[in-house]
Amino acid sequence: MTPPDPAGPARPPEPPREQRIAEAFVALADSLADDFDLPDFLHQLTTHCLDLLHTDGAGVMLADPDGRLRLLASSSERVRLLELFEIDATDGPCLTAYHSGHTTEHRDLSMPDPRWTRFTTRARHDGYRSVHAIPMRLRGEVIGVLNLFHTATGPLDATSQSLGRALADIATLALLQRRTINQHRSLAEQLRTAFTTRLDIEQAKGLLAERLNIEPDEAFERLRQHARATNTKLAHLARDITAGRTTLPETAKNRPTRPAPQTRHPTEPTERQP
C-alpha cells in the first residue's frame, strides 16, 4: 500500500484567470439578495483585487452622507492602519482620486510629491512603493474609492488598469442598485450601519486575536469563515462574540499560532511544548 503523503492531499489546480474574473464579476453583481452583507461584499472586492490585479494590498473607502470618506474594508491590518492615517491626515492619492473623480497614482513613492508628503513617508515606512487609487463613480456621482498598494514601483499594466476600473465600476453599480431596490433604506442608512458594525467587527477581531494569541488578520479571517459556515451575518457574529454570547469553536484550526505568553488564566487552553 502506498504510504500517505506527509504533505497531505494535493490541492486542486487553481482555475484559469479568465474563470476567476468571471466568478468575481458574478459575485460582485449579486447585491439583490435579502441577506446582502455590505462589510463582506467590500472585503470580497479587496480579495478579488489581490488575486486578479496582483496587488500587495487593497482598501475600500466609501463616503458618508456628509461626503467624508470612511474606511470600510482592507485586505490586511497594515493597509487598514495606512488608510486610517491617510483619512486622518487628509493627505494622499486616495483622497485626491475621490475629490477629483479621476484615477490617481504615485508610481514611485521614493520620489517626493508635494501633494501628499506625509502619506508618502508613511506608505514607504510600511513597505509600499507605489499606490493607485480608482474612484468608485457612476457618471458624475462618486461614492468612494478603491485603493491598490504595491511593494514595487511602476504603473499598473494596461490590462490591470482596465480590470481594476471594471471591478470598481461593478461594485459601484451593485451598491447603487442596492440603494434603488431598498426604498425604505437608503445607501446612506446602510453606510451608517456599516460604520457602526465596522467598529463591532474590529472589537471582535481584537478580542479573538488576544484570546487565541494570533494576528489581527488571521482573527478576521477566522471570524469571516465562521460567519459563512454558520450562515450568520458578520456583524451579528461580531456583536455576539464581543458580548460573550458566543465564541469560535476550539478546534485545531483555532489554536494559537504565536508563542504563548508567560502568564495565562488557568482555564484558558495552553499549547503543548515540543
Image (spheres, grey):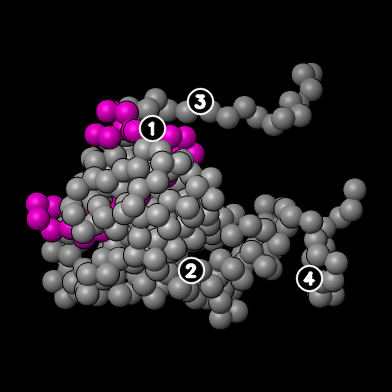
Q: Amino acid at mark 1?
A: Gly
Instruction: Kindly report which numbered mark, 4 or 1, lies closer to the viewer in this rendering.
Output: 1
Residue bearing mark 4:
268
Gap in Å between the C-alphas at discs 3 and 2?
33 Å
Q: Residue at x 36, y 38 (%)?
A: 107
The first of marks 4 and 1 along the sequence is: 1
Is any atom of residue 253 visible in this view?
Answer: yes
Residue bearing mark 3:
13
Which numbered disc covers residue 154? Answer: 1
- Mark 2 is surrounded, within 10 Å at the Cα level, by few (under 14), some (14 to 19) or many (20 or more) other residues, namely many
The first of marks 1 and 2 along the sequence is: 1
Point out residue 169 in the picture as x, y percentages from the top left corner: 21, 46
Q: Is residue 66 magenta?
A: no
Q: Amino acid at mark 3?
A: Pro
Point out residue 225 in the picture as x, y percentages from the top left corner: 52, 55
Q: Residue at x 29, y 62 (%)?
A: 62
Q: Is residue 263 left or right of residue 110?
A: right
Instruction: Kindly report which numbered mark, 2 or 4, lies closer to the viewer in this rendering.
Output: 2
Q: Are marks 3 and 2 in contact (CB under 8 Å)?
A: no
Q: Amino acid at mark 4?
A: Glu
Q: Amino acid at mark 2?
A: Ile
| Farthest residue, direction left | 139
Question: Where does the magenta region start and end?
Answer: 136-162
Residue bearing mark 2:
201
Residue sitting nearer the eye, 77 or 15: 77
Q: Residue at x 81, y 65 (%)?
A: 261
| Farthest residue, direction bottom | 243
Gap in Å between the C-alphas at discs 2 and 4?
23 Å
The first of marks 4 and 3 along the sequence is: 3
Dot 2: element: helix
- Mark 3 is surrounded, within 10 Å at the Cα level, by few (under 14), some (14 to 19) or many (20 or more) other residues, namely few
Is any atom of residue 71 visible in this view?
Answer: no
